[in-house]
Amino acid sequence: MPKLKVSGLKAYYFTDNGIIRGVDGVNFEISEGQSLGIVGESACGKSTLGAALMQSMQSPGRIVEGSITLEGDNITKMSSSEFDSRVRWKKIAMVFQGAMNALDPVYTVESQLREILAEHHYQGKIDDKISESLQQVGLDLSIAKRYPHELSGGMKQRVVIAMALLLNPDILIADEPTTALDMVVQSQIISLLKKLQKERGITIILITHDLALVSQITDKIGIMYAGQLVEFSTTKDIYKKPRHPYTQALIEAIPRLRTKDKKIHFVKGSPPSLLSPPLGCRFLDRCVHAMDVCKRDPPEFQTEAGYVRCWLYEGSTEGPQP
């Protein structure tokens, strides 16, 4: 049984301007202790997927279809109170995008950690738990007495990770955990996540736009485009044999130091609006392999280690390579 299974998940925002299809029919599963990277350009629905998994979509957003099964339980059927008492922060926790926005500027780190433990009726020694949480993310205990504005960007990010791990969750969702951090601190945060995964066997879902970054930590990768996962496979398979034209374009755009090709590659065009996504394949207008059949919505064609949503693979697991 997979640790987490997502089937036909649709999560929309019902605005005055129309329906924003943030997540539009997503399927994937991961096993205990595995790590998954969700990769794609901005405004492709990655953060909405993370919020849906945490049941934390804000109005006017909500899950409209599909299921999220955690250890055999469909958590989309749970009431808010049941989810809060059984799942939130205990089984699934989230590191939200932008550490400063996740911390209250008028309270010390210790006060905010205490509030979480009190809210969830923690029965152990609170001081010991706070010390343990800060130490496991590599922070000195003196950090507990500081306010968020007294911390560096890397420190704030570590505090947010410590908050997410307070109640020992099985799954940690990290939404752009290295945004606005310099390269050295980015490396430190990724090393920390790898260490936590190894030592605690935690399942990590890393949401990012950086395809090169996820290669350092993930077992599987889902390539997200316009609210859909257009390719899902093992990390090795994604890099060695990218199938979807969008995946191929993302990999080609990764800067390389040791190459004779000095040209800067990028994905031409922009993702479509999620208010009015195109009919058929959503990558149609940007795809170099576009065909008439692409005007129809492609199903998920099974591959060696996952699936790809592309008509190039109808009846086959192979197709054009970059």
Image: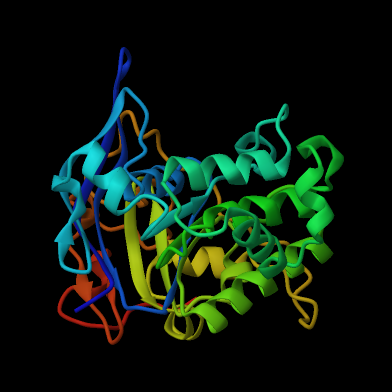
Q: How many marks?
A: 0
Q: Quadrant of residue 214?
A: bottom right
Question: Going 37% across and 29% down the picture, which residue do you hit?
Answer: 58
Left or right: 214 in relation to 99: left
| Depicted 83 relative to depicted 235: above or below | above
Q: How is the image coloured?
A: rainbow
- The percent coordinates of residue 27 (x first, y second) are 24, 61
Residue 240, position as x, y percentages in the image: 49, 86
In percent of width and height, residue 279 lies at 22, 41
Q: Is residue 262 visible?
A: yes
Quarter of the figure that contains the N terminus: bottom left
Instruction: Locate residue 124, reporting x and y percent.
Output: 50, 59
Please say if 32 is above or below 278.
Answer: below
Question: Does the rendering let one see residue 216?
Answer: no
User: In this image, 188 relative to 136: left or right?
Assistant: right
Compare residues 103 and 210 and report the one nearer the observer.
Answer: 103
User: Viewed as shown, does residue 33 lie left or right of 279?
Assistant: right
Q: Residue furthest top?
A: 16
Residue at the spot 56% in from the left edge and 82% down from the top edge: 199
Q: Nearer the viewer, residue 190 or 122?
A: 122
